[in-house]
């Protein structure tokens, strides 16, 4: 099957607008993670979903960020009232629990807030 | 929580030379240490990983060593080639049991291999 996919690949928005980023995981991967990668920086953990368990939201930088995962498959990351400092590449990764531990990354969404 | 430090932030080598990137971690419960390679504009991809029950692992020109006592691990690339040029990230995680398999990443090393 296909790997992790994300859409859109690029998103340019104006400060103050809301944006939604989408992640389609590898079929059968029950764990899903969102990371943020700012220019020249490492990958910053945002949120984690595992099956029907409550998500681990400990990495979300503010209450403007939220995410959901419907039916244990597709996930959307929503950023409300975007700020310029939200500009980054947002990466989704999925994993098959019980496997070797490898996370498979999507291509990312490059968000630019003007 | 876990904290991963990675050095150097940039590394420039001549083609054919070896490259070494080092990472330290803080949480002794971490037991899984992957290395990801990210080429410009591309997604991170796993190149090698090691579990805490092993001290060294090798895959062709790439090797990783782990010192659990000192809580550090290193990536070694031998006979570097221009196509090895990329950003390399180390990470640490606890896998198994009820853990969340969450990866904590280092800030990355930009490796440039000069022909």
Image (cartoon, coloured by chain):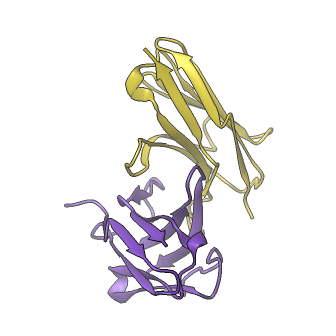
Chain colours: A purple, B yellow
Q: Residue A21 appears in which quarter of the rendering?
A: bottom left
Instruction: From the viewer's side, name the closer residue of B77 and B108.
Output: B108
Q: Quadrant of the N terminus of chain B?
A: bottom right
Q: Position of residue B83 (x, y in %)?
A: 38, 27
User: In the image, is residue B81 above or below residue B41?
Assistant: above
Residue drawn at the location 60% of the way across and 50% of the way down: B91
Residue B98 in sight from this viewpoint: no
Q: Position of residue B110 (x, y in %)?
A: 56, 36
User: In the image, is residue B71 above or below residue B18?
Assistant: below
Residue drawn at the location 58% of the way across and 87% of the way down: A64
User: How many dots with numbers?
Assistant: 0
Q: Position of residue A92 (x, y in %)?
A: 42, 66
User: In the image, is residue B60 above or below residue A75?
Assistant: above
Residue drawn at the location 45% of the way across and 62% of the way down: A98
Residue drawn at the location 46% of the way across and 80% of the way down: A14
Q: Residue A59 appears in which quarter of the rendering?
A: bottom right
Residue A80 in sight from this viewpoint: yes
Q: Position of residue A44 (x, y in %)?
A: 60, 62
Which residue is outermost to the top?
A: B16
Instruction: From the viewer's side, name the closer residue of B71 and B91.
Output: B91
User: In the image, is residue A102 above or below residue B36?
Assistant: below
Instruction: From the viewer's side, name the closer residue of B14 and A59.
Output: B14
Instruction: From the viewer's side, name the closer residue of A72 and B20.
Output: B20
Q: Quadrant of the C terminus of chain B?
A: top left
Which residue is outermost to the left?
A: A1
């Amino acid at each position: 099957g296909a790997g992790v996919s994300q859409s859109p690949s690029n998103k340019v928005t104006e400060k103050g607008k809301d944006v939604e980023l989408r992640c389609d995981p590898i079929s059968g991967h029950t764990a899903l993670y969102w990371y943020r990668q700012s220019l020249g920086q490492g990958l910053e953990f945002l949120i984690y979903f595992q099956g029907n368990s409550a998500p681990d939201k400990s990495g979300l930088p503010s209450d403007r960020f939220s995410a959901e995962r419907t039916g244990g498959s597709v996930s959307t990351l929503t950023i409300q009232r975007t700020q310029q400092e939200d500009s980054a590449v947002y990466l989704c990764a999925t994993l098959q629990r019980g496997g070797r531990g490898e996370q498979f990354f999507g291509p990312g969404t490059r968000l630019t807030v003007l | 929580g876990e904290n991963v430090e990675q050095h150097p932030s940039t590394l420039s080598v001549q083609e054919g030379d070896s490259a070494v990137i080092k990472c330290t971690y803080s949480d002794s419960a971490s037991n899984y240490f992957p290395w990801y390679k990210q080429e410009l504009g591309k997604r991170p991809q796993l190149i090698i990983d090691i579990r805490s029950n092993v001290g060294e692992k090798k895959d062709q020109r790439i090797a990783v060593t782990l010192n659990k006592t000192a809580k550090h691990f290193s990536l070694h690339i031998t006979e570097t080639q221009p196509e090895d040029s990329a950003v390399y990230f180390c990470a640490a995680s606890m896998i198994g049991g009820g853990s969340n398999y969450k990866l904590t990443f280092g800030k990355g090393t930009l490796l440039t291999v000069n022909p």
